[in-house]
Amino acid sequence: MPNSAADAAPAPLRLALPNDASAVETARQAVLAHLQGQALSPRALYRLELVLEETLMNRFWHAFPQGGRHTVDLTVQLTPETLELCFQDDGVAFDPTRAEPAPVAASLQQARPGGLGLMLTRKAALACDYHRRDGRNRFTVTLART
């Protein structure tokens, strides 16, 4: 019998998202609705939204250089201590766990938009894991619930 809201985790949420920037808000709303009442800290919710947006936008912008219709599959799994986001797609192979961080600008005048999402995702995560199998990327980000 569950002892707390954290022990009574919901079944995983599975979403199939079109490779379109408008899908980020759809995903955000669906994930937050799914996790409502699960005793996640405001800090955990912030990290969740950050990782969700940064990872999806990176996939939408970079994974499909030839264009066309593609799907990014997202699975959200809650455990008593963690929140796991798994992103899968058939885009260009890219291992975010081995990518070099973007250089930090020396001044505001030298700063350019973009390039920091991967660094922010790594800092927010307890763990990041990547596999390429059967022509599909699988990137899993594990976040703390607190």
Image (spheres, rainbow, N blue to C red):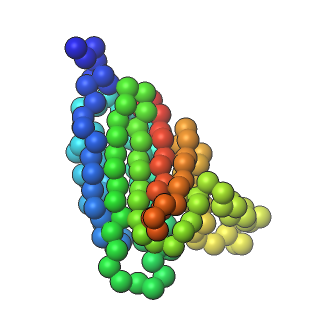
Q: Which residue occupies 31% across, 54% down?
A: 28
Q: Quadrant of the N terminus?
A: top left
Residue 8 percent location from the top left of the image: 25, 25
48 w.r.t. 94: above or below: above
Q: Nearer the viewer, residue 4 or 16?
A: 16
Name the image quarter holding residue 81.
top left
Residue 130 percent location from the top left of the image: 54, 53
Q: Which residue occupies 71% across, 72% down?
A: 110
Q: Which residue occupies 33% across, 69% down?
A: 71
Q: Which residue occupies 48% across, 82% down?
A: 65
Q: Farthest right residue? A: 106
93 w.r.t. 77: above or below: below
Residue 69 visible in image: yes
Name the side, left or right, on which 88 lies relative to 102. left
Residue 72 percent location from the top left of the image: 36, 64
Residue 50 visible in image: no
91 w.r.t. 11: above or below: below
Q: Quadrant of the C terminus?
A: top left
Name the image quarter holding residue 22.
bottom left
Residue 53 percent location from the top left of the image: 42, 58
Name the image quarter holding residue 40.
top left
